[in-house]
Image (cartoon, helix red, strand yellow):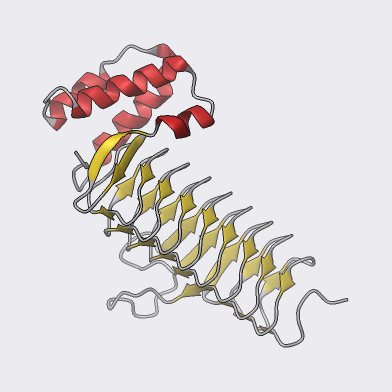
């Protein structure tokens, strides 16, 4: 029995693994490639130069690979790349990249992306993230591994959300959010550390102690950002060297200023 519903439209040139499932009335364009074990729900539209990996579950009515919502876009050859093991719920919209950036929108692996999420052109979403219902990423946004973006939250273009961040419901994120923080509100405020999330992911007490120290340097000691960056870089905590390096790298490449 064919795994492609007879009402689905799959263009010549599309490359689908033998066990890909395509539901009723789905439309798949000629430049689309879909890996093994992925299912495409009813009425989905997947177009453009879009590559989707293995074992993704794409629910009905999603729109993936459409032209970016950018007036400068003039049909340049750009891409959308989605990794493996993602859940993409109803009415999600992921756009192609633009020539003004890397030309590719990227979603990693094992992400849980709920209904009505919009991922705009040139975004980079890491692995193991959760984007709740109606979360919206404007163009050129980066969301690092294990971040959680609450429902109805908007992220301003060119903003970065660090690893292990938790952003609460209906937040307005217009400045970079350093790793490990918990934020919410409009205007956005840092409420503390995402300690419960870190514990659930197996962070040892020594690592948590280092992360708490970095939080104090950034938010509790009245330091300028430059002074806090220098103090964090100077921390001698071998058991948390990776976490300190992650924070230092994030602060060093922030372009919009950090939420404080």
Q: Quadrant of residue 90?
A: bottom right
Classify 66 as above or below 174.
Answer: below
**Residue at 43 percent of width and 14 percent of height:** 206
208 to the left or right of 224 = right
237 to the left or right of 254 = right
Is residue 21 visible to us here?
Answer: yes
* Residue sitting farthest toward the bottom: 7
Q: x%, y% of residue 138?
A: 32, 63
**Residue at 32 percent of width and 11 percent of height:** 236
- In depth, the one of 39 and 254 nearer the eye is 39
- In depth, the one of 145 and 122 nearer the eye is 145
Q: x%, y% of residue 244?
A: 35, 24
27 to the left or right of 163 = right
Quarter of the C terminus within the rendering: top left
Q: Quadrant of residue 259?
A: top left
Is residue 179 visible to us here?
Answer: no
27 to the left or right of 238 = right
**Residue at 77 percent of width and 86 percent of height:** 6
**Residue at 39 percent of width and 58 percent of height:** 123
Q: x%, y% of residue 59?
A: 61, 69
Quarter of the N terminus within the rendering: bottom right
Q: x%, y% of residue 222?
A: 11, 25
> How many marks can you see?
0
- In depth, the one of 33 and 187 nearer the eye is 187
Q: Quadrant of residue 178?
A: top left
Classify 126 as above or below 70.
Answer: above
């Amino acid at each position: 029995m064919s795994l492609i519903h007879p009402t689905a439209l799959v263009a010549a040139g599309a490359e689908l693994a033998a066990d890909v499932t395509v539901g009723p009335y789905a439309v798949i364009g000629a430049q689309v490639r879909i890996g093994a074990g992925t299912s495409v729900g009813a009425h989905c539209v997947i177009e453009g130069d879009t590559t989707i990996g293995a074992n993704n579950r794409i629910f009905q009515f999603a729109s993936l690979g459409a032209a970016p919502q950018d007036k400068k876009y003039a049909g340049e050859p750009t891409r959308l790349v989605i990794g493996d093991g993602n859940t993409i719920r109803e009415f999600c919209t992921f756009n192609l990249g633009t020539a003004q950036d890397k030309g590719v929108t990227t979603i990693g692996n094992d992400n849980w992306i709920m209904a009505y999420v919009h991922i705009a052109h040139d975004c980079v979403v890491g692995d193991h993230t959760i984007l709740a219902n109606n979360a919206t990423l404007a163009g050129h946004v980066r969301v690092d591994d294990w971040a959680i973006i609450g429902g109805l939250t908007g992220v301003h273009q060119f903003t970065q959300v660090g690893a292990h961040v938790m952003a609460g419901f209906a937040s307005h994120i217009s400045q970079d959010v350093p790793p490990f923080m918990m934020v919410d509100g409009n205007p956005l405020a840092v409420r503390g550390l995402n300690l419960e999330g870190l514990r659930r992911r197996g962070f040892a007490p020594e690592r948590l102690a280092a992360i708490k120290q970095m939080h104090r340097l950034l938010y509790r000691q009245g330091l300028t950002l430059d002074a806090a960056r220098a103090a964090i870089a100077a921390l001698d905590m071998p058991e948390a060297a990776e976490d300190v390096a992650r924070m230092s790298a994030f602060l060093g490449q922030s372009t919009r200023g950090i939420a404080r």
